[in-house]
Image: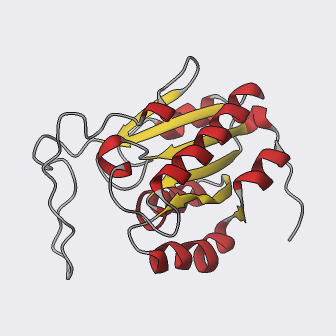
Amino acid sequence: MPELSLDARTTALVVIDLQKGIAGMPTMPNTAADVIARSAKLATRIRERKGLVVLVHVDAGPNGELFPRPITDIERPRLTPTPEWSDFVTEMTPQAGDVVVTKHQPGAFFGTDLEIQLRRRGIQTIVLCGISTNVGVEATARVGFEYGYNLVFASDAMAARDAELHTTSVTKFFPTIGRVRTTDEILAAL
């Protein structure tokens, strides 16, 4: 595996859905607490190096009506979010210079200003972390890849509802569109 080197000035850390309603649910293979702690370390380092931190959260609407509901073979659980469901966890409280993106679907690009926020700042590389690996992270990564961004995945700073879904994304798909590294490897590269 080639050594990783990142220029923080052209790198954005995009943190997916580390919000109270999502981080409060069970995750695998990494606990939500571990994902949050590792993501916070990455955010601190990026900010220290004058990189960009993008905090993404999903707003499904008061009764979940803003989340897509096409006909599927396996229906996703319906949401009845509490008022604080979309609030960031304390460790991911936005700080001066951070960009906050509110989405209404799994991916962070569709229907948001994420692309313009990144392009206008000259971002070339996106480091991705958050919950869940196979939904929000993967949906964002697919579009980021199509836009031509270099992608780096913090494999131990993400989790899913099912360990197999996480592992499949991290070992089978992510290496075909970017570079998969641990939090410590990414911190060292910055």
Residue in the image at 65% along x and 55% along y: 148
User: Residue 173 lies in what quarter of the image?
Assistant: bottom right
**Rendering colour mode:** secondary structure
In the rendered structure, the answer to whether residue 162 lies left or right of residue 36 reads: left
x, y percent for residue 124 = 71, 44
Residue 180, image quadrant:
bottom right
Q: Residue furthest right?
A: 3
Side (left or right) of 56 relative to 103: right
Between 35 and 76, the one lying in front of the other is: 35
Residue closest to the eye, 150 or 76: 76
Q: Which residue of the protein is positioned furthest toward the left in this rendering?
A: 63
Residue at the (55%, 76%) spot, across then down: 167
Between 77 and 142, the residue placed more toward the observer is 77
Residue 81: percent from left, percent from top? 17, 45
| Quarter of the image with the N terminus in it | bottom right
Number of marks in the rendered image: 0
Q: Is residue 14 above or below residue 105?
A: above
In the drawing, does residue 9 fall left or right of residue 15? Answer: right
Name the residue at 52% across, 46% down. Answer: 36
The percent coordinates of residue 78 (x first, y second) are 14, 60
Rendered view: 5 above or below 75: above
For residue 50, what is the image quadrant? top right
Q: Is residue 171 above or below residue 60?
A: below
- Image coordinates for residue 91, horizontal then vertical, percent: 50, 34
Q: Is residue 96 above or below residue 145?
A: above
Which image quarter holds the C terminus? top right
Look at 66% across and 52% down and name the residue there.
Answer: 149
